[in-house]
Image (cartoon, rainbow, N blue to C red):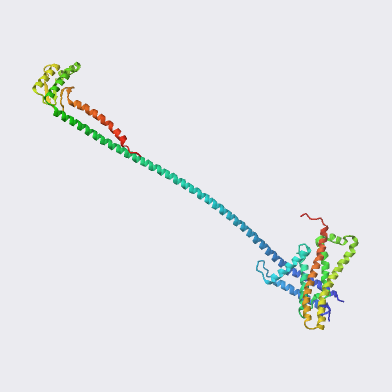
Amino acid sequence: MLIDWYTVIAQIINFLILVLLLRRFLYRPILNAMAERERKIADRLTEAEAQRLAAVAEIEAYQQKNAAFAVERENLMEEAQAEVAARRQAWLEQARTEVNVTRTRWQKAVAEEKESFLQTVRHQTEQQTYQIIRRALTDLADADLEARIVQIFLARLDSLPETDVQSIRDSLQAEQAILTLNSGFDIDNEQRQRLRQAIFRLFGVGQPMHIQTKPDVICGLELTAPGYKVAWSLASYLDNMEESLAEVLATMPADTAVEGQPHG
Amino acid sequence: MEISPDNILYGPFGPFKLNATILFTWLIMALLVGVSWLVTRRLSSDEQLSRGQNLLEVLVKALHDQINEIGQQRPEPYLPFIGTLFIFIATANLLAVVPGFRPPTGSLSTTTALAICVFVAVPLYGINRLGLRTYLKQYTKPTLIMLPFNIIGELSRTLALAVRLFGNVMSGTMIVAVLISIAPLFLPITMQLLGLVTGLIQAYIFAVLAMVYIASATQVQEEARPLPDD
């Protein structure tokens, strides 16, 4: 008999025990280890993928930041340029204003200086002209001229309005004043007599009269009573001339100032 | 000369008798469990692993994939049974080259025992997966008339499984014995090497056939079921 049933049963039991033992010591641990490894690998792959995504996101964020930075830099640059331009403009304006102020001040100073200079020139001209004419007339004066002056003075006395004569007469009587006759030259006796007579006839008898020589009265005569004065002399003409000269010279600074204004 | 290691007795121990088949089966069991325990007590789930773990992983993975390929199902429930069949038979056959070792698979008792295990495992797996009624209905397919033939087929293929393994392993041992008497030098060694190959092939065939039977028991009914919505 090839089959020993005792052995068969024993082998069945042996085999079942072997199955259980190998399942406990071989299949289960090995399969678990392999599954664990696969899980770890899968985890690592997932992690790697996550890290890759994170890296991509970081790259993107970095690029965005870079772009934003570039834009900001551009903006700042533009702002700075605008500010520089504005400040430059402001400084230019300020400099221009300062230049204008300085120029105006300078022009004013120049104008004042010119005015002052012209004033001086004017005054000097007046004085010189006056002096020259005065000296010339003084030099020119002689007996004929003096006689002529006395004659003109007498004519003027005659042509005095009656009201004036009366007023002078009244004032002489009221105040008991003395008539004074100033002369620019020495009057000879004959002329003195004529003058005394004329004055006596005009203003009444008994009035004392004082006759004196005064160089100020150029080539002329001057009769003064309190509050009144009757005169004819070159001085009055000279005074008129001086006024005219002053007027003419006064118009000059404006013209010369316009012509002399600096361009700029 | 003894054909079966069942007849080599190492003395009775009380009511139990210890023959070569059982003894060498125990040796193989001790070897397999010992190696497995030594390797798997320090398992690594990282990239770095020991050579032993690598070897066992290759073996288990190969079995796993083979079962998956044949059964077209998740291999985990079948792996311990089918895998142990292969590993046990292959180890027994390979150790046949060791002088003095009597492979237990050379005993018709052992192969019968293994065949009976398969014979029992097939309906167990089928019932476990399909339920008792559905499994029993298979025997009446395609008609009730086929019931006896199906039962005969079930029994005969178990017998064939047992005898095939026994015959191959036993014949290998027998051929060596015969050849030693004719040409005692080189030829037996060649035959022994050939025996290693046939031993491995037999282990593979036995495991694959067992898986095919189990797969047929667990799959046939599925084809008749309405297709699940994918």
Q: Looking at the picture, tell me which residue is in the foreground, B19 or B214.
A: B214
Residue A162 vertical placement versus B92 (above, below): above
Front one among B22 and A208: A208
Q: Residue furthest right?
A: B145
Q: Quadrant of residue A205?
A: top left
Total residue callouts: 0
A234 is higher (above) or lower (below) than A7: above
When the figure is inspected, residue B53 is found, relative to residue A92, above or below; the finding is below
Is residue A83 among what the camera can see?
A: yes
Quadrant placement of the C terminus of chain B: bottom right
Image quadrant where residue B216 sits:
bottom right
Decide if residue B85 is on the left or right side of residue B48. Answer: right
Query: How far from the left and from the top, in percent, is residue A221?
Result: 15, 24
Residue B14 seen anywhere in this rendered image of the structure: no
Residue at position x 25%, y 34% in the image: A119
- Taking depth in this image into account, of B3 and B116 the one nearest to the observer is B3
Q: Quadrant of the N terminus of chain B?
A: bottom right
Image spot of residue B23 (x, y percent) = 79, 77
A141 sits left or right of B27 in the view? left
Residue A193 falls left or right of residue B208: left
Please provide percent x and percent y for residue A111. 30, 37
| Place of residue A255 in the rendered image (x, y in percent of width and height, measured from the top left) | 30, 33
